[in-house]
């Protein structure tokens, strides 16, 4: 491949990854800001849950329309629309009216839902086969960087409007950067081709198999508990030990840094070790980590064990389900249904995200914190079984080779 092509691909991946950065930042920044927002607006338990989950409701809607928009108008034009949504949503959330705040978070959520499907789709379509795993995983690296930066912003700014307003910067970078990149050749090819009736194409036997796996891996990424840790980490620490706001956020910063470093490590493994092996290894490690977390909380044997268990869990997630779930849904679908199928998988991801994040605090109140994490451990065991039975290896395989696999 020519040097100028490689440089263009890297530039395009960098620019669209600002959307993924905003995905991570906007979902996680509420973790620290929530402590101060609750004090200012005197929120109850239900209102806190709504504040966190309304962005996810927006993301569910965004994921639903994201694939449709990407297939109809193109990946690049859809990302332009997203950048405007992020700018508008950020403007609303830094105001003083709580209802506008909620509406702004919902708009941000729509943007997050759209980029969750369109960014990995865009990168996968411009990437060479040999490096596709690492390049698409830049999507997850940008998400994790957004999470990590949100924790640092929470820790240093200590003003929730400044925390949330920081999102203006990457939103502007995304909007301006999109002027310098092109539409993917796969989408342009799709516009030229005449496919069969959409329903007939969508419900072909081999496409249904791919869709089952895409939805399955997307749901598993969420129900194993990652966003419980990301959204509620400071809250968890304050429940198990008398941390003040600043201390709880600082520990969350450590978790964010660990996830970022381990995600970088995963970039070197995905195209060497393979997707399937890393998923199996990661799921098993996550199950063990969640078990020890629940065990430590049940016995009350110290905050250090709890922190180490969360670091272990984050590390295993970062080299497996974190990047690979998004990578797989960008790889396994044929061009004829790719945008819509990725959108459906992303919709499933956000639906599961909403269910877990909204139910976590009530579940913890019902079962207790320790038993709740035992439940997540069992779910990780189930994910190991699903991956072993259903998920194919896509390392070094072209889109056409992957489609032949489903046919066989």
Image (cartoon, grey):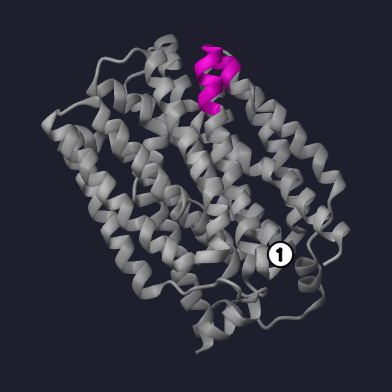
Q: Quadrant of residue 193?
A: bottom right
Q: Is residue 157 magenta?
A: yes
Left or right of 3, for residue 112 = left
User: 107 or 396, which is in the foreground?
Assistant: 396
What residue span does the magenta drawing correspond to? 150-163
Name the residue located 61 percent from the left edge and 76 percent from the top edge: 397
- Pick the quarter of the image with the N terminus: bottom right
Q: Is residue 403 magenta?
A: no
Q: Residue furthest left?
A: 299
Q: Quadrant of residue 394?
A: bottom right
- Please rate how many residues cluster around mark 1, counting C-alpha atoms within 10 Å: few if below 14, some from 14 to 19, many from 20: many
Task: Find residue 316 and report its horizontal and vertical position in percent.
Answer: 39, 49
User: 366 or 125, which is in the foreground?
Assistant: 125
Q: Which residue is mark 1?
A: 125
196 in relation to 280, above or below: below
Name the residue located 86 percent from the left edge and 46 percent from the top edge: 180
């Amino acid at each position: 491949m020519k040097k100028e092509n490689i440089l263009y691909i890297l530039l395009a991946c960098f620019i669209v990854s600002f959307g993924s950065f905003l995905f991570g930042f906007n979902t996680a920044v509420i973790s620290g800001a929530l402590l101060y927002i609750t004090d200012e607006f005197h929120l109850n338990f239900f209102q806190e849950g709504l504040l966190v989950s309304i962005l996810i409701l927006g993301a569910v809607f965004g994921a639903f329309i994201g694939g449709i928009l990407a297939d109809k108008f193109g990946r690049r034009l859809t990302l332009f629309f997203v950048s405007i949504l992020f700018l508008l949503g950020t403007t609303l959330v830094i105001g003083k009216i709580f209802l506008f705040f909620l509406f702004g978070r919902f708009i941000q959520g729509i943007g997050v839902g759209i980029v969750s499907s369109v960014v990995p789709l865009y990168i996968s379509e411009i990437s060479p086969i040999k490096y596709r795993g690492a390049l698409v995983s830049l999507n997850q690296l940008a998400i994790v960087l957004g999470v990590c930066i949100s924790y640092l912003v929470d820790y240093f700014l200590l003003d929730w409007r400044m925390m949330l307003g920081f999102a203006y910067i990457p939103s502007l970078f995304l909007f301006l950067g999109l002027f310098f990149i092109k539409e993917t050749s796969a989408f342009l090819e799709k516009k030229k081709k005449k496919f069969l009736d959409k329903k007939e194409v969508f419900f072909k036997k081999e496409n249904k198999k791919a869709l089952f796996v895409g939805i399955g891996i997307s749901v598993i990424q969420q129900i194993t508990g990652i966003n419980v840790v990301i959204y509620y980490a400071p809250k968890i620490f304050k429940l198990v030990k008398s941390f003040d706001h600043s201390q709880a956020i600082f520990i969350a910063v450590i978790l964010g840094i660990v996830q970022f470093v381990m995600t970088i490590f995963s970039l070197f493994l995905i195209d060497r070790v393979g997707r399937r092996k890393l998923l199996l290894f990661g799921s098993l490690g996550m199950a063990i980590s969640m078990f020890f977390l629940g065990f430590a909380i049940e016995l009350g044997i110290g905050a250090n064990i709890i922190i180490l268990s969360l670091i272990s869990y984050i590390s295993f997630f970062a080299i497996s389900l974190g990047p690979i779930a998004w990578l797989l849904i960008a790889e396994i679908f044929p061009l004829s249904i790719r945008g819509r199928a990725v959108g459906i998988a992303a919709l499933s991801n956000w639906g599961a995200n909403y269910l877990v994040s909204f139910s976590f605090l009530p579940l913890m109140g019902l079962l207790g914190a320790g038993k709740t994490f035992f439940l997540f451990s069992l779910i990780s065991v189930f994910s190991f079984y699903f991956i072993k039975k259903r998920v194919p290896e896509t390392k070094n395989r072209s889109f056409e080779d992957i489609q032949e696999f489903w046919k066989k």
